[in-house]
Image (spheres, grey):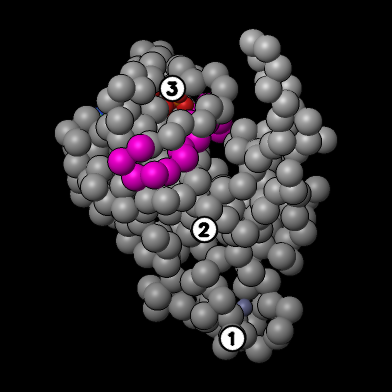
């Protein structure tokens, strides 16, 4: 077994260095970012540049739930577009969500509440502000942060590897991870809906137990999309995910 960030290990203290003797059993592990033993995954979205890739966000939320890790959505850069930040919050109304601005030191108290006494990772695209938020938790970390590429308006991938920090005033372990955009899911299309908290409520009204909420008649989820109880954009991205899995 290869060690992962977040692993608990038995180690031997040798002169000048330590050697891992055994990796202890993991309570969970995620593939992307590759981190073990998490209590929470903090999915960081940007309300300004770079514009959030919400398909990636939805896939990461599915992965967290599949791994048994509670996701928290952190909508950062609220100073750039507060209205859009609120729109995102609405779109993810079924999730635990906080609004922050690492630049203006806003919402850092909420972030502290979410991580207190826990082991968490910050995940998401490059340049959404993961390292900046960790710096706000303890300025002595002095993590390097990066701007956006002028050409593409995308992040520059400043953080290159996952790294664990201990935040003393919250008694929390926080993993900073490199931003990424590509994400392949290893799931069957009929499993996906079960990872959408809003679908679980309305799916009970579907005529068919195995309803994929796609082309089936009398579908509770589709009805809830029509009445606005389920966010249409979330639903349309769900269809993109299951159709891409069908093609595979
Ligand atoms: N306006 C604004 N800019 C921010 C905020 N948070 C971070 N930034 C800026 O966004 C850029 C990227 O921040 P990082 O903290 O490096 O982002 P990251 O998510 O760690 O990026 P990677 O390490 O590439 O994955 C930097 O120029 C930060 O100063 C914020 O709340 N508001
Ligand atoms: Zn249905």
Residue 209 within the magenta-colored segment of the rendering: no
Provide residue 123's location: percent of width, then percent of height.
Answer: 50, 39
Q: Quadrant of residue 7?
A: top right
Picture coordinates of residue 93, whole percent (x, y): 37, 64
Between 54 and 175, the residue placed more toward the observer is 175
- Residue at numbered disc 3: 155
Q: Would you say the beta carbon of the disc 3 residue lies within 8 angstroms of ligand 1?
A: yes
Residue 56 in view: yes
State which image quarter holds ligand 1. top left
| Res. 204 mark | 1
Residue under the image location 44 percent in, 71 percent down = 230
Sequence-first tag of 2 and 1: 2
Of the numbered discs 3 and 2, the one sitting upstream in the chain is: 2
**Which-is-in-front pick, marks 3 and 2?**
2
Q: Could you tell me if residue 128 is visible in this image?
A: no
Vertically, is 64 above or below 30?
A: below
Pick whichever, 142 or 97, lies toward us.
142
Depth check: 174 or 155 in front? Answer: 174
Task: Describe residue 76's horizontal placement relative to residue 56 as left or right.
Answer: left
- Look at 34% across and 45% down and name the residue there: 170
């Amino acid at each position: 077994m290869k060690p992962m960030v977040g692993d608990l290990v038995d180690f031997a203290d040798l002169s000048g260095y330590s050697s891992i003797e055994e990796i202890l059993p993991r309570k969970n592990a995620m593939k992307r970012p590759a981190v073990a033993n998490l209590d929470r995954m903090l999915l960081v979205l940007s309300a300004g540049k770079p514009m959030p890739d919400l398909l990636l966000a939805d896939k990461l939320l599915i992965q967290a739930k599949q791994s048994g890790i509670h996701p928290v959505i952190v909508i950062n850069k609220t100073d750039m577009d507060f209205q859009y930040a609120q729109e995102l919050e609405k779109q993810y109304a079924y999730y635990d969500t906080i609004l922050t601005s690492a630049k203006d030191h806003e919402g850092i108290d909420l972030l502290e509440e979410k991580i207190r006494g826990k082991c968490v990772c910050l995940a998401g695209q490059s340049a959404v502000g993961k390292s900046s938020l960790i710096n706000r938790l303890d300025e002595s970390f002095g993590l390097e942060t990066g701007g956006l590429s002028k050409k593409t308006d995308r992040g520059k991938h400043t953080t290159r590897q996952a790294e664990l920090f201990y935040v003393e005033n919250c008694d929390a372990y926080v993993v900073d991870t490199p931003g990424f955009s590509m994400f392949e899911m290893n799931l069957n299309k009929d499993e996906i809906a079960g990872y959408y908290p809003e679908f679980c409520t309305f799916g009970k009204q579907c005529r068919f137990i195995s309803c994929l909420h796609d082309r089936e008649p009398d579908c509770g989820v589709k009805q809830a999309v029509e009445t606005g109880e389920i966010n249409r954009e979330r639903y349309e991205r769900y269809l993109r995910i299951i159709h891409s899995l069908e093609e595979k």
